[in-house]
Amino acid sequence: MLHLLNSAVMPTEGIYTLKRISETEFQTILQAADDFRSYIGYPETARMIQELTGIDIEVSREQAELTPGDSMLIVKLRHRIKNLSDLGPYQPSLDDLEFFICDWQPLTEGGTPE
């Protein structure tokens, strides 16, 4: 399954391979996905992904649970905002985002990749 996230997190023990992709690659991968689950926690981020892809994106604050064969499609801010109250109303745009794909492998009982 493909998991859609708004940060590069490691929710499960294992080996992760993170690769930066273009906005177009992100759009193509998500539009071609037969099955994905959204873990996008912010309405503004969900709205921007919907505008980019034409796909309804659910807002969810749940933690992703990975199973063998899963990948993560990640969209995140290019920079960290130290204090949102200093900015007033913050309206990020697609130019403020960067895109990644992350593959994951579980560890065996001995702590080595499967």
Image (spheres, rainbow, N blue to C red):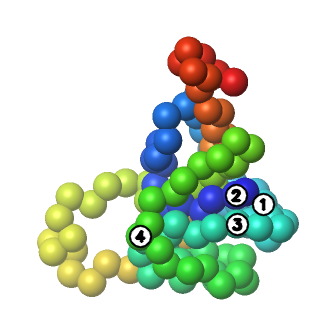
Q: Quadrant of residue 44?
A: bottom left
Q: CA distance from mark 3 to mark 1?
A: 10 Å
| Percent of width and height locating residue 72 | 63, 52
Query: In screen coordinates, is 75 left or right of 33?
Result: left
Q: Amino acid at mark 2?
A: Leu
| Residue under label 1 | 29
Instruction: Of the two numbered discs 2 and 1 on the same chain, state the one appearing first in sequence.
Output: 2
Query: In screen coordinates, is 98 left or right of 33?
Result: left
| Percent of width and height locating residue 79 | 37, 54
Which residue is pictured at 72% across the width and 57% down the height? 1
Query: In screen coordinates, is 63 left or right of 71?
Result: left
20 and 57: which is toward the camera: 57
Task: Assign a secondary structure to mark 4.
Answer: loop
Instruction: Of the two numbered discs 4 and 3 on the same chain, state the one appearing first in sequence.
Output: 3
Q: CA distance from mark 4 to mark 3?
A: 15 Å
Judge the density around disc 1: few (<14), some (14-19), many (≥20) Cα neighbours within 10 Å.
some
Q: Amino acid at mark 3?
A: Phe
Which residue is pictured at 60% across the width and 75% down the height? 49
**Decide: marks 4, 3 in contact (CB < 8 A)?**
no
Which residue is pictured at 60% across the width and 49% down the height? 66
Count the marks.
4
| Residue under label 4 | 61
| Residue under label 3 | 36
Q: Is residue 17 above or below residue 22?
A: above
| Percent of width and height locating residue 50 | 63, 81
**Decide: marks 4, 2 in contact (CB < 8 A)?**
no
| Percent of width and height locating residue 93 | 49, 74
Instruction: Of the two numbered discs 3 and 2 on the same chain, state the one appearing first in sequence.
Output: 2
Instruction: Of the two numbered discs 4 and 1 on the same chain, state the one appearing first in sequence.
Output: 1
**Labels 2, 1: front one:** 2
